């Protein structure tokens, strides 16, 4: 049976390294990656409804899991927004698909970013979750540049079971996320 490379790495290397550096007594207390949430807001969707459909299609192609459209919760007249209008797309990845996406993000997509020097450590929320913003969806090799109507960014949130940002930072570094050296 196939097991993702990063899942095996977590079980064989990361558990021991985290136990050693933070002094956990139980394997169950060691933080783990619970899910990866990928969100994409489509600002121009108020004028062109087809943009949300293409965003859902692109995100499904990138993540390998069916994306769903997100809808506005209230009316905002300055943005020409009505309650219930489609305004974006989202996917929540868990299990093997999560590890596969993380592997492709680290080894293929992030190095394709222009002028890439590492990701910023300031994206932690205080309770062990990290959010990374990507400016262009074309860094993913699954996307055909010729078929893209508009370039838009996305937010990728890594939800961990870590209690502190320091534990989550160490966990994500061990997975191979290329943080900037400050």
Image (cartoon, helix red, strand yellow):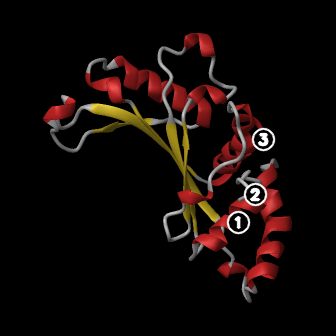
Q: Mark 2, residues whose alpha carbon is within 10 Å: few (<14), some, or many (≥20)?
A: many
Across and down, in percent, residue 182 comes to 71, 59
Q: Vertical placement of 130 versus 104: above or below?
A: below
Across and down, in percent, residue 34 comes to 59, 62
Q: Residue at x 45, y 21 (%)?
A: 54
Across and down, in percent, residue 95 comes to 64, 54
Q: Vertical placement of 26 versus 37: above or below?
A: below
Which residue is situated farthest in the top direction here?
Answer: 146
- Is 19 displayed left or right of 151 in the figure? right
Q: Nearer the viewer, residue 38 or 5?
A: 38
Where residue 24 sits, quadrant-wise, is bottom right
Q: Residue at x 81, y 50 (%)?
A: 5
- Mark 3 secondary-structure assignment: helix
Which residue is situated farthest in the bottom direction here?
Answer: 25
What's the CA distance linking mark 1 and mark 2? 6 Å
Instruction: From the image, tell me which residue sits under label 2.
Output: 175
The reply to whether callout 1 and callout 2 are in contact (CB within 8 Å) is yes
Q: Earlier in the sequence, mark 3 or mark 2?
A: 3
Which residue is situated farthest in the right direction here?
Answer: 12
The reply to whether callout 3 and callout 2 are in contact (CB within 8 Å) is no
- Is 50 displayed left or right of 148 in the figure? left
Picture disc at residue 69? none
- Mark 1 secondary-structure assignment: helix
Q: How many numbered marks are there?
A: 3
Picture disc at residue 171? 1
Q: Mark 1, residues whose alpha carbon is within 10 Å: few (<14), some, or many (≥20)?
A: many
- Mark 2 secondary-structure assignment: helix
Instruction: From the image, tell me which residue sits under label 3.
Output: 107
What's the CA distance linking mark 3 and mark 2? 11 Å
Where residue 89 sits, quadrant-wise, is top left
């Amino acid at each position: 049976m196939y097991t993702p490379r990063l899942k095996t790495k977590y079980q064989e290397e990361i558990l021991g390294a985290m136990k050693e550096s933070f002094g956990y007594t139980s394997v169950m207390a060691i933080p783990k990656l619970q899910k990866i949430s990928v969100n994409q807001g489509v600002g121009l969707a108020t004028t062109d409804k087809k943009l949300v459909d293409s965003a859902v299609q692109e995100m499904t192609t990138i993540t390998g899991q069916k994306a769903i459209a997100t809808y506005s919760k209230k009316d905002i007249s300055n943005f020409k927004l009505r309650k219930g209008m489609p305004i974006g797309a989202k996917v929540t990845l868990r299990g093997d698909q999560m590890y596969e996406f993380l592997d492709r993000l680290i080894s293929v997509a992030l190095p394709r970013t222009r002028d890439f020097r590492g990701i910023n450590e300031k994206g932690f929320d205080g309770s062990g979750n990290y959010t990374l913003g990507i400016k262009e969806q074309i860094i993913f090799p699954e996307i055909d540049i010729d078929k893209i109507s508009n370039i838009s960014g996305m937010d990728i949130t890594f939800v961990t079971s870590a209690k502190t940002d320091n534990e989550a930072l160490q966990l994500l570094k061990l997975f191979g996320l290329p943080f900037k050296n400050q």
